[in-house]
Amino acid sequence: MENYSIILCFALLLLILIYQSVLIIIFDKKRKTLINDYEKLLNLKDWYEKVSEEASRSYLMESVEKRGHELINQLNLLNTKLVKIQEHHKNLQEGQQELHDGLLEEHKLLNQYFENYS
């Protein structure tokens, strides 16, 4: 009976050892799978950050380009208004010159009239 107990204990220890070995193999495979999944997640995170940065840069470039076009349009409008103001100023100066010339002519005529009158 004692032999049976020893064989039974030995068999039980062998079973425990096999069970532990199987668990170690299973956990090792799971660990490797988790490590691979983690590496894939890190790669995806890096890819997402790059795509996010590129999208952000693209959005900024589009915003700057849009704002640039708006500023160019505003400058063109201001330039058009400036040209109109310059034309109006030129017309006013010509009108002022004509009035000045007219006044000089009237002054000459008045001087002649008073010279002839006296």
Image (cartoon, rainbow, N blue to C red):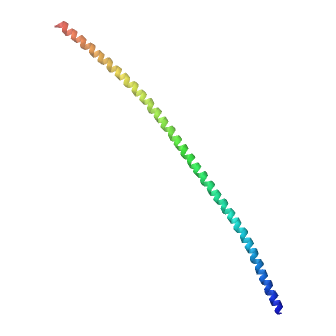
84 over 61 or under it: above or below:
above
Using the image, determine if residue 103 lies above or below residue 56: above
Going by the image, does 40 lie left or right of 14? left
The residue positioned 19% from the left and 6% from the top of the image is 116
**Where the N terminus falls, by quadrant?**
bottom right
Residue 74, x across and y down, in percent: 46, 35
Q: What's the residue at 83%, 90% (across, down)?
A: 4
Q: Nearer the viewer, residue 30 or 77?
A: 30
Q: Residue at x 50, y 41 (%)?
A: 67
Residue at the left extreme, as displayed: 118
Residue found 58% across the figure and 49% down from its top = 55
| Percent coordinates x, y for residue 86 in the rendering | 39, 26
Quadrant of res 3: bottom right
Residue 73 in the image: x percent, y percent?
49, 35
| Residue 118 position in % (x across, y down) | 16, 7
Rendered view: 38 above or below 117: below
Q: Is residue 19 above or below residue 32?
A: below
Q: Nearest the camera: 118 or 61?
A: 61
Please, which residue is most extreme toward the top here? 116
- Give the left or right position of residue 58, taking residue 30 as reference: left
Q: How many marks?
A: 0
